[in-house]
Amino acid sequence: MTIDHDEVLSARVLLLGSGRPSRAELAGAYRVLAEVNPKVYMPKLVDAVLGLYYESRDPKVDLALAEEAARAARRMEAGAPNRAERLRRALNAYQTSLFALGRRAEGRVVCEELAEGGDSDRLASVLAEEGRFREAAELDEESARNGGQEQSFWTMVRRAANLEGAGLPDAAAAVFRELLDETRHKTAEQRASLSILTWELVHFSRMRDAAGDGASGTAARREALSVLEELATTGKPENWSCILSWWSTLFVLSGRAAEPAASPACPMPPFGTELGWSGDVRDAFLAMLPDLEAEAVRLREADRLPELADVQRRIIVRAAVRDGGRPYLFRERFAPYFDEGVTLARRLPGNSARLARALTDRSMFLVAARTFEPAYADLSEAVTLLQDR
C-alpha cells in the first residue's frame, strides 16, 4: 500500500493539536496512522470506529462501521493488550448488524468466529432460532463444563429450554432442578425474591406436566402455592429492584409450543432468554401481532372460543416480549389481557385445563405486579382444578 505522507502529517497534526477532534475526525486520523504504525493505532482505530457504531442509527451505516471494526480488530497483533476483548466487541457489533438486515448466513459465520474465541452464547441463540436445539444445547453444556458460562437464572433457563427443545425433557428438568435448589437457598438467606421462586416453580410444573410427569408437576405447583401463600398472608417485604424480566422470560417460554416450529427457513425467537434475540427474528415475531389480532376478531365473531383463547394467549406473549420489562403502568397495561383470558376460559364448560392455564397465567402476572392476595386466589383455584381433573 502506498503511504500518502501528506495525509499522515495531517493526521498527526490533528492528534497533536490543541483542539478537541470529533469522534469521526479521530477515526479518520487513526485509519491513516494504523497503516503506518498498526501496533499503536490499530487498537485506537477499533475503539474509535466502534464509538461511531454505537452512535449511529442507520442500519447500513452500522454494518459498514462494524465490519470495519472487525477487520481492524482481526489485524491487531496476536498478544496485543485487550486484543481478545476488542475482537469480541467488534464481532458482536458485526453480527448484530448483519442479523438486523436479515443476512443470517453471514451473521452465523461471525457467531461461529466468536465461538472459536470462547464466546458461544450468541451462536447458541442463533442455532435455537433455527430449531437446532441439540446443537445449541451441546454448546451450552460445553460452555458450562469449561467454566465459560456463569450459572445464573439466565444461563440455566436457556440451557433447560434448549434441552427441552431438543426432545430431552429429563435432562432439561435436571438443569431446572439445579436452578430451583439455588433459588431456594438464596431466598432462605434473603438474597433472592420469593416472587422469582414462585415463577420458577410454576414453570417447572408446566415442564413436568408436558413431559408426562404429573407427580412432579403437582408437587411443584403445591410448593409454588405455599410460597405464594407466604407472600399473601405474612406481608413479607419484596423490596427488590425491577424483576419483571424474570417473569416475562418464563411466561414467553411457556408459549413456545403454540408457535410455529423454528427452522433455518423460518427462524423463531430463542425462547428461554431475553438476551441475544436477532433483530430480524424479534421484528418478525412482533410483526405477527396484526394478523393474530385480526384472527381473534374472526374467532370471536364466530364464537369459536377454544381457538380464541389460544390466539389471545399468543397475543399476550408478544405483548410481554414488547413491553414486559417496563415497570411504568405495568399492571394497567397487562391486566386487561389476563382478565380477558380468564373470562374466555370460564366460558368453556368442561375445559378445566384451559381455565387452569389462564388462572395460572394471571396469577403469575399478579405476582409480577406485586398483588399477592389475588394471585394466591387464582393459583389456588388452578391447583384445585388440576387436582380434580
Image (tube, rainbow, N blue to C red):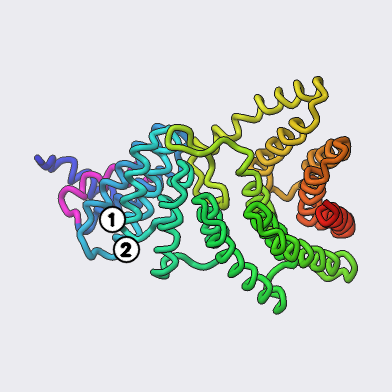
Q: Main secondary structure of the magenta part?
A: helix
Of labels 2 and 1, the one closer to you: 2
Residue picked out by circle 2: 82
Disc sitting over residue 278 in the figure: none
Magenta stretch encompasses residue 24: yes
Q: Are marks 2 and 1 in contact (CB under 8 Å)?
A: yes
* Residue drawn at point x = 55 percent, y = 60 percent: 172
Q: Amino acid at mark 2?
A: Asn
Q: Is residue 244 above or below residue 317?
A: below
**Does residue 138 appear in this view?**
yes
Q: Is residue 328 above or below residue 184?
A: above
- Label 2 crowd bin: few (<14), some (14–19), many (20+), radius 10 Å: few
**Residue 34 spot, x, y in % from top left:** 21, 50
Q: Secondary structure at mark 1?
A: helix
The amino acid sitting under disc 1 is Pro
Q: Describe residue 19's horizontal placement relative to residue 206 as left or right.
A: left
Q: Position of residue 359 (x, y in %)?
A: 82, 48
Query: In the image as oriented, which residue stretches furthest toward the bottom?
Result: 189
Which residues lie in the magenta part?
20-38
CA–CA distance in space, label 2 to label 1 = 9 Å
Q: Is residue 133 left or right of residue 182?
A: left
Q: Which residue appears at 24% of the width and 54% of the height?
A: 41
Mark linked to residue 43:
1
Percent across and percent down for residue 111 are 36, 48
31 within the magenta span: yes
Q: Is residue 22 visible?
A: no
